[in-house]
Amino acid sequence: MVVEEDTEAMKKMGLKLLTFISLLLLLLTCSLRAEAKECKPSGKIKGKKPPPKKCNRENYSDCCQHGELYTIFHCSPPVSKRTRAVLTLNSFQKGGDGGGRSECDGKFHDDNTPIVALSTGWFNKKKRCFHNITIYGNGRNVKAMVVDECDSSVGCDEQHDYQPPCPNNVVDASKAVWKVLHVPKNKWGLWRASCERAANFVRLVIVWVD
């Protein structure tokens, strides 16, 4: 009788242990999946001082500082049907702060056209070229075409107008986009999506149109 009770107790203990191990493995798997989806920095580059009369500061652009380390990314946050991002201002015209010609077609573009550049991960090796995205913000929306990359993987060189690498969640928009969103001109380039300061910053929702 005692032996049977001991056997039954051992079975229950073994079942509990098996359940615990299964839960542990499940949690570990979920954790690894989440980690795989996370976009982590790919390294850093050292800033170079721009040559004289280089680095266009139009549209609040920053210039690289000599010796400063800048984080680079080869990825962007995973894209869902609605993804928050950072809306910035960029000139796609010749002589503008956007630097060289657009990555998609090797051309300059009129800033009065609703167009955007995307961070490296979202640009996805030109796979987003000429696709439209709808940007919701400030109670309005605008459809804009992807024509360029906002490079998150390199910067501080002539090709990138001696500007730092882009963050990995940028939608760099022409002034036409800001106009349609009815953002006051003195706020262009300064509004960012933020859960913490939603009352003061534009909330941008991107819907990919494939």
Image (cartoon, rainbow, N blue to C red):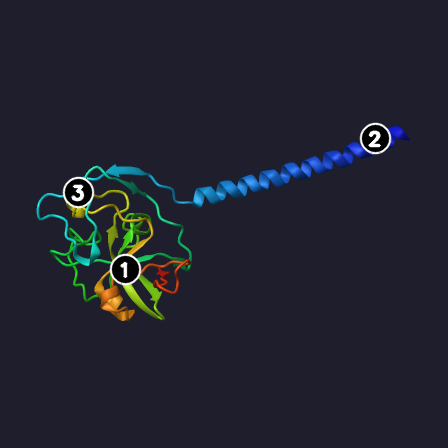
Q: Secondary structure at mark 3?
A: loop
**Is there CB contact under 8 Å for labels 3 and 1?**
no
Residue plotted at (39% across, 60% down): 197
| Relative side of 89 to 136, left or right | left
Disc 3 marks which residue? 157
**Quarter where residue 133 is shown:** bottom left
Q: Is residue 76 above or below residue 141?
A: above
Disc 2 marks which residue? 6
The amino acid pointed to by label 1 is Leu
- Precedes in sequence: disc 3 or disc 1: 3
The amino acid pointed to by label 3 is Asp
Query: How far apart, in angstroms, are the residues tagged by discs 2 and 3?
Result: 74 Å
Q: Is residue 58 above or below residue 152?
A: below
- Precedes in sequence: disc 2 or disc 1: 2
Report the mark closest to the observer, 2 or 1: 1
Query: How far apart, in angstroms, are the residues tagged by discs 3 and 1?
Result: 24 Å
The amino acid pointed to by label 2 is Asp
Residue plotted at (55% across, 39% down): 28
Which of 85 and 100 lies nearest the eye of the viewer? 85
